[in-house]
Image (cartoon, grey):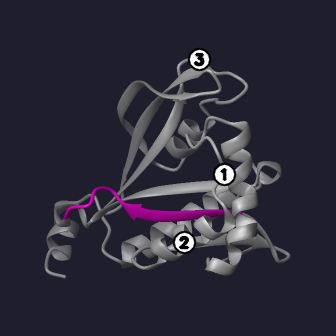
Amino acid sequence: MVIRSACTADAVHILHIYSYYVESTAISFEYEAPTPEEFARRIAGTLERYPYIVVEEKGVIKGYAYAGPLKDRAAYDRSCEVSIYVDQDSRGAGYGRALYEELEKRLKEMGILNLYACIASPIEEDKYLTNDSEHFHAHLGFVKVGEFHSCGYKFGRWYNMIWMEKLIAPTILSRAALTDR
């Protein structure tokens, strides 16, 4: 297993993973998968400020994770939103954990204190969405901090959206030291 920074040349391979989630699940609230060119722009835009990483096995990308701004205001600069997608046929192989551990390490080095994950949540589990993502994030130390009800509509059904948070520098001493950076 190799984890490395993504580049725009990875867009087609990463988009292949993401397209499944757009077209076959309510995990992504997008209705249509972006074009490879749009996806490459998204990767490039993220890399201007945040990590965007992929995990490979024998040269094949098995998943990816990235960070982005929580909100577009300077006061939020020590927090970020994180996202992760693992190839549907590679789930359960440890790629997700490995990606998030590396992403968290890189974000800590940047002075990020808090991670937030925006997760589609079923009102009732169905063939498009389960609670697996919430459970995965909880297993990695995220806690649920908010829920928006019936805010996403896909496949003729309403879905909730939850926010989960992980404090990666939770002590006052850690935060005080980072404010001097």
Question: Pointer 3: what residue?
Answer: 124
Residues at marks 3 and 2, CA–CA distance in whole angstroms: 35 Å
Cα separation between marks 3 and 1: 25 Å
Q: Amino acid at mark 3?
A: Glu
Of the numbered discs 3 and 2, the one sitting upstream in the chain is 2
Region of the chain picked out in magenta, as a range: 63-73
Secondary structure found at label 1? loop
Label 3 Cα neighbours within 10 Å, binned few <14 / some 14-19 / many ≥20: few
Left or right relative to 139: residue 110? left
Q: Are marks 1 and 2 in contact (CB under 8 Å)?
A: no
Residue 15: say if magenta. no
Residue beneath disc 2: 41
Q: Is residue 91 left or right of residue 31?
A: right
Helix, strand or loop under label 2: helix
Q: What amino acid does circle 1 point to? A: Ala
Question: Disc 3 vs disc 1: which is toward the camera?
Answer: 1
Residue at coordinates 74% horizontally, 47% vertically from top-left?
A: 20
Q: Residue drawn at (82%, 77%), measured in percent from left and top?
A: 59
The kind of residue tagged 2 is: Arg
Q: Nearer the viewer, residue 125 or 157?
A: 157
In the rendered image, residue 177, in percent from the top left (x then y), is placed at: 17, 75
